[in-house]
Amino acid sequence: MQNRVKPSSPSILKLQNAAQRGDRGAESRFWRRATKTKTPLVEPMASDPTHRWVTYVWRGDRRIHSVGLISPQTAFGTIDQLERVPRTQVWYRTFKVRNDGQGTYMLLPNPPSVVPADLFGYLALWRKAKPDPLNPISFSSAVNPDYPKGGLGGHHWSVLQLPNAPHHSELEAGPRLPRGTISTYRIRSRTLKNKRKIWVYRPPGERPLTQETPVVIFFDGFRYMTDAAAPTVLDNLIHRKRIPPTLAIFVDQLDGATRNRELPGYPPFGRFLVRELMPWIRKAVGFSPSPNRTVLAGMSYGGLASMYWASRHPRLFQNVISQSGSMGVSPPGIDEPVALARYFMHRPKLPLKIYMDVGRYEARSETENDVGHLGANRHVRDILRVRGYPLLYREYCGGHDFFCCRQGLVDALRWILS
């Protein structure tokens, strides 16, 4: 899906030709148009009405010798380079994007010549990147106040959203929307030897919770509460009677290093779920959730954890929401990509209902032993279909992005809880 194209967008071609002719006013006219129409530049393709030219631009000066781009079309762990239109300070990068494309992006003036190979070095570049000054639509990822430095939030993105991109009204909190309540707890784990916050969402209204009340356990709980707007989504879906009154448990993953250790099939985390978290939930909410009404939900490593632990403990968890799940990453000690697919192929069929989504721009691998999110998810999808699992699988035109995740969450909850 990484479609690098030659500078074919009408605006860039027009500027190139004018600059080559020595038209000194061409660059000023270009920036006046860009300021009026906003960026990135989105232009129709005469030969293909299902796609648009999308051109990311940056206004440089003599201090700028290169400009990096982090976008839906950029492979995670890499930075694309913008090109400069000769005889101007217009830096640009053009892609062919489907009409329902969406996602977030940032620009990085004068990026390092070598992109850090480790995850946290790469994420440190995000903090130096800047939103697009000519794009009025932005998306900010929240900072977990308990982990202001080691967390994964705190970035300010610009938003690309093409005409046919999905946008669910359930993400908006109207003034008359009945709100659920959120209570904060702290739970100490003897298994994991750490302590974390747990947020419990209770649906609006006075109805008593029963064993048949759906329970959704979100990994990366802080980000689902903030970046994914999960409480607002639940409020809207419950109010519109699209799902029954639902209890939600948001599990904090602490800092980034702890998250990346615990979520990809870490055996002590599985013991924490079964021996500590589930008994705590029964005590905190006053009832034992029914396995066929209990959902594990997460994105990226959280999506992998949801699928992995439901497959190991189907007597407790029989519903899965995996959003852009890291299916190519195998549990510790297994040096084989997409080991989860082989597990589902060779084990007896389990009583699981599964929602999966993944971005069409997640095609490139992050490591040598990773086939990439898109390919890995398609492989697991095919195995689940062959085995006859109840499955809803979606591919959205975007990347590894909580902005896209929040759109898919509406569809996931409606399907899995309907």
Image: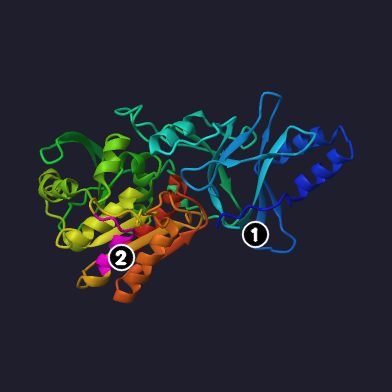
Find the distance from the CA under tag 2 to the CA under tag 1.
33 Å
Q: Is residue 201 visible?
A: no
Q: Is residue 88 part of the magenta span, yes or no?
A: no
Q: Which residues are magenta?
A: 334-344
Between 320 and 137, the one lying in front of the other is: 320
Kind of residue at disc 2: Ala
Q: Residues within 10 Å of mark 2 (few under 14, many from 20)?
A: many
**Quarter in which the C terminus is drawn:** bottom left
Left/right placement of residue 1 relative to residue 354 reads right
The secondary element bearing badge 2 is classed as helix
Query: Which residue lies most toward the top here?
Result: 63
Left/right placement of residue 274 relative to residue 256 reads left
Q: Is residue 340 part of the magenta span, yes or no?
A: yes
Number of numbered callouts drawn: 2
* Callout in the foreground (2, 1): 2
Is the C-beta separation of discs 2 and 1 under 8 Å?
no
Q: Is residue 210 visible?
A: yes
Q: Position of residue 105 (x, y in %)?
A: 54, 41
Between 8 and 171, the one lying in front of the other is: 8
Residue holding disc 2: 341
Q: Residue at x 55, y 58 (%)?
A: 1
Kind of residue at disc 1: His
Left/right placement of residue 243 relative to residue 51 reads left
The quarter holding residue 340 reads bottom left
Q: Residue at x 51, y 28 (%)?
A: 128
Q: Is residue 30 above or below residue 416?
A: above
Q: Position of residue 14 (x, y in %)?
A: 81, 46
Between 95 and 283, the one lying in front of the other is: 95
Residue holding disc 1: 51
Q: Position of residue 152 (x, y in %)?
A: 38, 36
Sequence-first disc among 2 and 1 = 1
